[in-house]
């Protein structure tokens, strides 16, 4: 773990979760930056990026390796990630409260010993907060590269809203910096000192290069044959290209000037399309939650492993 010893984990009690009354002040409403910008369809492009950041944390990587089905069911994993994000941000306080309790209860069982002989537990504060942190970074990065650029003031507000939402799942106030400026320093430290190369990140990248057909009823086989290559190309470029250069180098990921130019061109085209995008693509949360309502009723948003609440994108 890059010279850093694991701190013995002491399980947190249910008291780490806020009361139902407090939750109502933590969940975003229609007048928030998160509500307006958190469900843009173009943020899907950064889902792999967020996941890559997550699984290179040794604890998250170990949990995903032993308790997740990301390799055999990558689309199911992405849908469960979107379930989590959209329920928490757009489902209202009651749904967010239920999801927060289910999530922490499920994570109690995610523990073990990694291939290096290090014990891990999904509720260790650092990795638990890191997963939540990568999602807000993916939103900001996704809009900067593919969507509507946020002002410095909007980013500050978005981060405060996302940090507050973390309290609903038990991310304590002290687990993440108070400000976006502090977050950037925290992010750089995590990359420099905590994130590691492992087999999980390479498995994630492999699933992106040859994606299976997503379980979307309106997507027929012919349409998927047409969309598969450009989708795989965009996801692969965004996942590797958006990673910090230090982490790319540590993981042995090749990145060329030609790839950088291609990613920039895709981003430019995506941003230029903003005035032409219908409102339903700028915020897909409503149609998505209606489509997934049966799965959400079963608790699919929190039914799997650490990192499953990842790749918000």
Image (tube, rainbow, N blue to C red):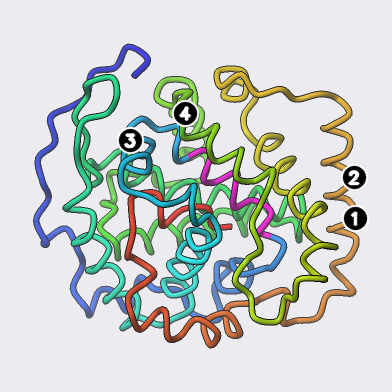
Labels 3 & 2 near each other (Cβ < 8 A)? no
Residue 265 numbered tag? 2
Against 267, is 148 above or below? below
Labels 2 & 1 near each other (Cβ < 8 A)? yes
Local SS, label 3: helix
Cα separation, mark 1 vs mark 3, equals 37 Å
Q: Is residue 20 highlighted in magenta? A: no
Local SS, label 2: helix
Earlier sequence position, callout 4 versus callout 2:
4
- Disc 3 residue crowd, few under 14, some 14–19, many 20+, Cα 10 Å: many
Q: Which one is in front in this view, the residue at disc 3 or the one at disc 2?
A: 3
Q: Between 194 and 258, which is closer to the camera in this rendering?
A: 258
Earlier sequence position, callout 4 versus callout 1:
4
The residue tagged 3 is 62
Cα separation, mark 2 vs mark 1, equals 6 Å
- Disc 2 residue crowd, few under 14, some 14–19, many 20+, Cα 10 Å: some
The residue tagged 1 is 269
Local SS, label 1: helix
- What residue is shown at x 33% (from left), y 59% (from top)? 304
């Amino acid at each position: 773990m890059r010279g850093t010893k694991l701190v013995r984990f002491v399980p947190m009690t249910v008291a780490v979760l806020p009361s139902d009354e407090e939750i109502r002040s933590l969940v975003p409403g229609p007048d928030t930056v998160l509500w307006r910008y958190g469900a843009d369809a173009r943020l899907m492009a950064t889902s792999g990026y967020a996941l890559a950041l997550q699984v290179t944390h040794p604890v998250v990587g170990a949990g995903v390796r032993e308790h997740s089905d990301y390799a055999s069911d990558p689309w199911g994993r992405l849908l469960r990630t979107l379930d989590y994000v959209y329920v928490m941000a757009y489902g209202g306080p009651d749904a967010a409260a239920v999801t927060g309790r289910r999530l922490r209860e499920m994570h109690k069982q995610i523990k073990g010993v990694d291939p290096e002989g290090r014990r891990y537990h999904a509720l260790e504060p650092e990795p638990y907060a890191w997963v939540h942190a990568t999602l807000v970074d993916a939103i900001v990065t996704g809009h900067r590269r593919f969507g509507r650029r946020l002002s410095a003031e909007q980013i500050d507000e978005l981060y405060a809203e996302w940090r507050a939402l973390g309290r609903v799942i038990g991310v304590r106030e002290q687990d993440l910096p108070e400000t976006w400026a502090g977050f950037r320093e925290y992010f750089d430290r995590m990359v420099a000192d905590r994130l590691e190369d492992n087999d999980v990140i390479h498995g994630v990248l492999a699933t992106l290069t040859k994606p299976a057909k997503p379980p979307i009823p309106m997507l027929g086989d012919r349409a998927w044959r047409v969309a598969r290559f450009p989708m795989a190309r965009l996801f692969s470029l965004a996942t590797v290209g958006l990673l910090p250069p230090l982490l790319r180098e540590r993981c042995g990921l090749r990145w060329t000037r030609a790839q950088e130019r291609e990613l920039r061109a895709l981003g430019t085209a995506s941003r230029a399309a903003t005035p032409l995008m219908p409102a339903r693509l700028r915020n897909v949360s409503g149609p998505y939650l209606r489509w997934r309502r049966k799965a959400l009723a079963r608790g699919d948003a929190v039914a799997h492993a650490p990192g499953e609440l990842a790749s918000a994108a």
